[in-house]
Amino acid sequence: MYRAVILFFLLISFTGLSQEMNEKSFDFWVGEWDLSWTNAKGTTIKGNNSIVKILDGKVIQENFTDPSTGFKGTSISVFNPQTKQWHQAWADSQGGYIDLIGAMDGEKRIFKTKPVQQGDKKVVRRMVFKDISENGFTWDWESTTDGGENWKLLWRIEYSKKAH
């Protein structure tokens, strides 16, 4: 009985640890990706995203391109071992800049903004990586104005690993 109780608590401890953010939480993202999404006019758009580890493998760098519009973006993502949080800084060819903090929700990986006051509402935006497999995943850009009770989908991109 004693062994069963110890085994039970060890199992719970290891299960809990697997749900915490760590330096490998976004390793699935590293690679060369073909992207597909539907724009506001209903047209399917194809793009590319190149994700590499830099600076001795401690930083993830993203290079996003939308050939249909010439839009380009880049991000730097890094894990802080002291706070056990991921941080991402995004900048793009339109002068946009977004600062995000990483989180996990089950199997989903999330980067979320701090609340920003827009008129009479506080807006939070987040990117959600979900349905993650070796060959692809879904990326959603969402926003909320009610503290996260309801999220509105703004943009969905399907990622497919490029064939070598």
Image (tube, rainbow, N blue to C red):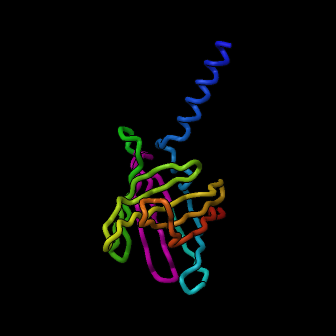
Exactly how many numbered labels are in the figure? 0
User: At which x and y percent is residue 132?
Assistant: 62, 55
User: At which x and y percent is residue 41?
Assistant: 56, 87
Looking at the picture, does residue 15 appear above or below residue 93? Answer: above
**Dominant secondary structure of the magenta stretch?**
strand
User: At which x and y percent is residue 104?
Assistant: 51, 49
Magenta run includes residue 64: yes
Magenta run includes residue 17: no
Q: Residue at x 47, y 41 (%)?
A: 22
Q: Which residues are magenta?
A: 51-79
147 to the left or right of 134:
left
* Res 5 → quadrant: top right
Image quarter of the N terminus: top right
120 to the left or right of 102:
left
Q: Residue furthest top?
A: 2
Q: Residue at x 55, y 29 (%)?
A: 13
